[in-house]
Image (spheres, rainbow, N blue to C red):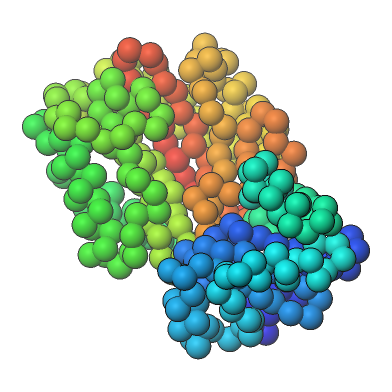
């Protein structure tokens, strides 16, 4: 069965269970997942019988032309003369995803629908957490390319080269090796900059014995990879080893725990924290252990201390233990897992 048709049918089961007669999503990743329209903005409206995509003028022709290549049948409407509001008013119980709309936007839609529009949690995001075989193929291709890129740029990491130089080369290599684009803005962080988890590459040049953290991903046919490696130029200091070795231990033990059948994302994160506690490093681990990867670089499941998510078959996620020492350096190693 066509994957888009299958996904729409699954999504419609939500309408059956809840009694709503139309759900609306404006998240471009959800729109891509349900229709195949990539990076398109608008409102996708799904009822028991029809699928209608309301979009603005700059996306309308793309949607019309792209639909000819797709096997999913849906109606495309250009937003004009309040036709979107009229469409919503026809339905008795329309619903929009609460995480996709601002309070101001909600007020306006509620007013235009005479208060009929309700909100709900994004159940399509939960559907996307479990990957289909064709999605996994794309993600694995994006991962293979990312690993090849890091291998290519490794010899360039030496004194005198700047963070921006490496970021530019990564961008070039991604496309040369078959990727469509960066999955996100590449992080190249050296020296003290590596202690900032989301550092933006600068003109700082690498120095002897620098730690260089590179966090990068590749996008292939709408799906992404996300990996992080930490390199050392020259000699690895004892202080750096006291951080790198515990991080490697976390990876080893988390992988073993996953193979042993642990599914609780919260427990996996807390286990990593306990390992860092053994070395007095837990307070320098300042983010979650990992996250799902797919159409978005960060999606379900979430691996952190408050997560209620569980690892299920066919999920794709990262494990990225890290330690950031203020005023000194940071080390992060991120690997992707396929459940």
> Residue drawn at (46%, 28%), measured in percent from left and top?
322
**Front-most of residues 86 and 52:** 86
Vertical arrangement, residue 49 with respect to residue 258, above or below: below
Residue 77, relative to residue 337: is it above or below? Answer: below
Quadrant location of the N terminus?
bottom right
User: Residue 102 location, x and y as percent?
Assistant: 63, 44
- Asked whether, in this view, residue 65 is left or right of residue 330, the answer is right
User: Measured from the top left, where is residue 192 in percent x and y?
Assistant: 28, 20
Left or right of residue 329: residue 47: right
Q: Nearer the viewer, residue 237 or 293?
A: 293
Answer with left or right where residue 151 lies relative to residue 333: left
Residue located at (61% from left, 59% from top): 26
Quarter where residue 191 is shown: top left
Give percent across and percent down for residue 175.
26, 63
Residue at the image point whose x is 28% and y is 59% from the top? 174
Task: Report the quarter where the C terminus lies.
Answer: bottom right
Residue at the extreme front:
81
Tell me if I can see residue 263 in this picture.
no
* Residue name at image x 46 percent, y 45 percent: 335
Q: Is residue 334 above or below residue 16?
A: above
Q: Is residue 40 visible?
A: yes
> Residue 299's spot in the image, x, y percent?
58, 49
**Numbered label tally:** 0
In this rendered view, identify the residue nearer to me: 337 or 116: 116
Residue at the extreme left: 160
Q: Quadrant of residue 225?
A: bottom left
């Amino acid at each position: 069965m066509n994957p888009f048709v299958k996904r729409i049918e699954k999504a419609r089961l939500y309408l059956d269970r809840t009694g709503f007669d139309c759900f609306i999503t404006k998240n471009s990743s959800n729109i891509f997942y349900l229709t195949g329209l990539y990076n398109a903005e608008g409102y996708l409206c799904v009822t028991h019988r029809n699928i209608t995509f309301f979009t603005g003028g700059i996306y309308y022709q793309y949607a019309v032309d792209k639909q000819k290549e797709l096997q999913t049948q849906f109606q495309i409407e250009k937003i004009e003369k309040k036709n979107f509001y009229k469409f919503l008013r026809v339905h008795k119980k329309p619903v929009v995803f609460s995480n996709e709309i601002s309070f101001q936007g909600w007020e306006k839609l509620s007013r235009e629908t005479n208060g009929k529009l309700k909100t709900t949690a994004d159940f399509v995001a939960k559907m996307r957490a479990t990957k289909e075989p064709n999605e996994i193929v794309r993600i694995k291709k994006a991962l293979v390319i990312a690993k090849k890129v890091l291998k290519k740029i490794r010899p360039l990491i030496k004194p005198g080269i700047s963070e921006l130089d490496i970021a530019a080369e990564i961008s070039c290599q991604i496309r040369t090796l078959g990727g469509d684009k960066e999955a996100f803005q590449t992080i190249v962080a050296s020296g003290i900059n590596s202690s900032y988890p989301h550092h933006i590459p600068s003109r700082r040049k690498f120095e002897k014995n620098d730690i260089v953290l590179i966090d990068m991903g590749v996008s292939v046919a709408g799906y992404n990879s996300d990996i992080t490696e930490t390199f050392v130029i020259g000699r690895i200091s004892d202080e750096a080893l006291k951080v790198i070795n515990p991080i490697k231990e976390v990876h080893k033990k988390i992988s073993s725990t996953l193979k042993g059948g642990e599914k609780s994302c919260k427990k996996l994160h807390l286990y990593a924290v306990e390992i860092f506690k053994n070395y007095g490093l837990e307070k320098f681990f300042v983010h979650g252990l990992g996250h799902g990867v797919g159409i978005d670089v960060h999606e379900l499941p979430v691996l952190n201390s408050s997560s209620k998510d569980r690892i299920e078959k066919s999920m794709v996620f990262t494990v990225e233990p890290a330690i950031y020492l203020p005023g000194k350096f940071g080390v992060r190693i991120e690997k992707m897992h396929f459940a």
